[in-house]
Amino acid sequence: MPEHPRDAAPLGEDLVRRGLRLARRAYLLRVVGLALGALCAGAGMYQADAPIWVWCVMLGYGAAWPRIALLISVNASSPFAAERRNVLVDSFAGGIWPVAMAFNLLPSVLLLAALAMNNFSIGGVRLFLKGLVAHLAGAGVALLVLEPKFQPESDFLTELLCVPFLLSYPLLMGSVVYRFSVQLSKRTGELMMEKRRADEANLAKTQALSEAASRDDLTGLFNRRHMHALLTQRRTACQRLGDGFALALIDLDHFKHINDTHGHATGDNVLRAFGEQARAAMRDTDTVGRWGGEEFLVLFACRTALEATQGVERLRQAVGAAVVTTPAGQPLTFTVSIGLTEHVPSESVEALVERADRAMYQAKSQGRNTVVTLLN
């Protein structure tokens, strides 16, 4: 009966199911164990000339107790706890029979060893010690009601009748242990798979939350916090490698006029349209984010502003070709002014963005819908 309630610490219905399985395995072991044990105890009691009423108690106990113990466990709210109490009853009865056998050594040792194995397999050292106390209690009661005798020698008949128990009970215990080990291995595999799925689900959820936290709700582009973190990381990497990178700051032209004339809903649609065009026009290695309001920032993978010129021009043209429908059903086009620059070694992120901002305002002052590059 090697199943411990603390193994895997199951809860609720799973714990009850495992307790019921334990109770059914215990029933089989009790039936077989008491039948084989009756041969050992009967031989010892016969050799000790035990009273007839002791024989009746032993036979009645062996016939009735397995079924009673099963009913107790099956109907209990906690089959595990009920079965642990049942094995203490086994231990108490196990303390009676050695006294009834006048402490005949061989059958007494076999019975007590079998009960000790059951206790240890179900509840570990703690239940083993409780079972030992129950053995002593049973022996104490037996000593009070029976005439104490001490005949430790076993005759041939007693030895012969102990052989079936000695051969069969360990095999039965081994079978139960094997079945339990198979079930435990299967359950361990299931728990590992469940944990893996839970870990993967938690990781996916964490990644989704992280992704959502880094995105602008309206355009779907990265937000300012995420873009600032990327800028800081790129600056640190470039300082370490002695490399550079290009940066563009983009502003939607006449965006306030669009909001005032056509409403904020149309303004939102314009911002969404820019996000769509930016994702389509930029390379996968370039990163676009909403910097604030109608301003956007592009972090290029290329090292210089010259290399990024083709990309920002492609974006400017794509935005100019985009069309948004107003509430009145009229097509609306819009343009952008772009300031392009590149990172100067040792300068701060703030200085880099400020230079891109100056370049962008120069583009506006030159008539908008254009790109101005400012290197220092």
Image: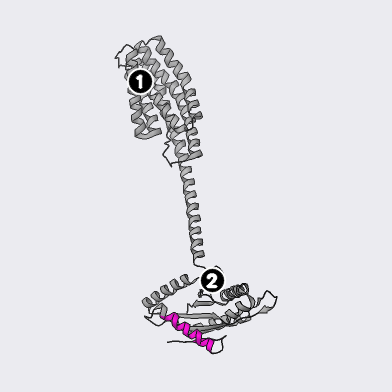
Q: Cα distance, mark 2 to mark 1? A: 79 Å
> Which residue is denoted by mark 2 in the rendering?
221
The span picked out in magenta is 351-374
Foreground residue, 285 or 174? 285
Q: Amino acid at mark 2?
A: Leu
Say which element carries label 2: loop
Q: Quadrant of the C terminus?
A: bottom left
At label 2, counting other C-alpha atoms closer than 10 Å, the crowd grade (few under 14, some 14-19, many 20 or more) is many
2 or 1: mark nearer the eye: 2
Foreground residue, 354 or 64? 354
Name the image quarter holding residue 168: top left
Foreground residue, 231 or 92? 231
Considering only vertical position in the picture, is 234 above or below 61?
below
Q: How is the image coloured?
A: one colour
> Which residue is denoted by mark 1 in the rendering?
138
The percent coordinates of residue 264 (x first, y second) are: 60, 73
**Extreme residue in the right direction:** 329
Can see residue 157? Answer: no
Q: Quadrant of the N terminus?
A: top left
Considering only vertical position in the picture, is 234 above or below 107?
below
Name the image quarter holding residue 260: bottom right
The percent coordinates of residue 94 (x first, y second) are: 37, 22
